[in-house]
Amino acid sequence: MQTAVSADGRSTILSCKGMNRWFGGLHAMKDISLHIDQGEILGLVGPNGSGKTTTVNAITGFFPPQRGDIFFGDVQLNSLKPHQIAQQGIARTFQNVALFKGMSVLDNILLGRHNFMKPSVLSAMFYWWAAQKEEVANRDKVEEIIDLLQLESVRDEMVDVIPLGTQKRVELARALAAEPTFLILDEPMAGMNQEEKEYMVRFILDAHEALGLSILLIEHHMDVVTAICDRLVILNNGEKIKEGLPQEAISDPDVVAAYIGKVEK
C-alpha cells in the first residue's frame, strides 16, 4: 500500500478499511473504516458497547479483524502479533489501569523500554560496560519522560499508593517510554475528577507537541474530545455513524439519538 496524503498535505499513517470482527454470534465491528494523519489527534467516541475498544484491540493485534485491512504506513498489521505491532512504533494505554503493583513508578515506566533492551548473559558477563551503557541510555530516556509528565515527586513511590490520576499519568509515561510515533489512549480520564482531567489534557497536549505524536483518543468526556481532537469518528452498535469536525459530529441527529435516544414527535 502506498502512503496516502490528506487534503491538507499530511501523510496518512494509519488506514483501516472495512474492518469486521465477530465474537460468536455478535458482530462487534461492522465494516469500520477510519484513517489518522501524521500529527493528528483523532477522537473515537460512542456509547458503551459501540465497538471502540474492539476497534483498538483490532489495530493493536489483540483481536485482529476477521475481514478488512489495517495498514500502518506501508506495513500491513493484520497478521502481526501485539509485540510486533509495538515494534512498529505503536503504543497504547488501557481503559483500566494496567500497572504492575508492588513496583515503583520508575520501574513501571522502565518496562516501557522493553523493545530497546537486548539482554544477553555473555554481554553482561564479559562486556559489562556495554550492558551498563544500554541501561544508562534507557534510564536517561525514562528521566526525560518523567520530567515531561512532572512525575519527579513520585518517581520512587510504589504505584499502589499513588492517586488514580497519577497512576493514569504513569501509564501514559510507560507508553511514551516506548518512543511511539502513534499513541492510542483508551479512556485516559476514566474515574478522574475535573482537576485531574484538566491536568491529563495538558500532559497529553504537551506530549503531542514535544514528541510529534499522532494520537487516537477514546474518551467519554465530550468536553475533552471537542477541545483537543482534530476530528471525531463516532461509533454505535459496531458501526461508524459519523465522521467529521468535533462540533459538527456531535450535533448530528444520528449521534444525538445514539446517546439519548430518538425523540418521538
Image: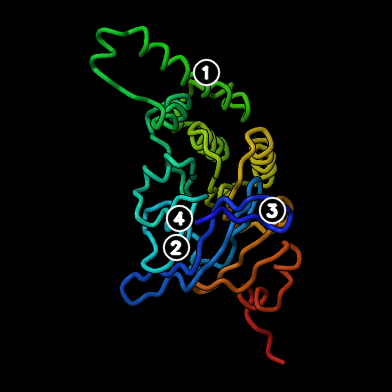
- Taking the spot 37% from the left edge, 54% from the top edge, the residue there is 62
In terms of depth relative to the viewer, which is nearer, 241 or 8?
8
Question: Is residue 85 found left or right of 257 in the rendered image?
Answer: left
Compute the Cα span from label 2 to label 4: 10 Å
Instruction: Identify residue for label 4.
Output: 59
**Residue located beneath label 3 in the image:** 229
Describe residue 15's horizontal placement relative to residue 129 as left or right: right
Residue 16: x %, y % from top left: 51, 61
**Badges 2 and 3: C-beta atoms under 8 Å apart?**
no
- Return the x and y of residue 119 as percentages of the image width and height: 30, 22
The residue located at (55%, 40%) in the rendering is 181
- Please tell me whether residue 71 is drawn above or below residue 154 in the rendered image: below
Q: Nearer the viewer, mark 2 or mark 4?
A: 2
Of 177 and 154, the residue lying toward us? 177
Mark 1 and mark 4 lie on one chain; the one further toward the N terminus is 4
Nearest to viewer (mark 1 / mark 4): 4
* Label of residue 69 in the image: 2
Q: Earlier in the sequence, mark 2 or mark 4?
A: 4
Which sits earlier in the primary sequence, circle 2 or circle 1? 2
Q: How many marks?
A: 4
Secondary structure of the residue carrying numbered label 1? helix
Q: Mark 1 points at which residue?
A: 140
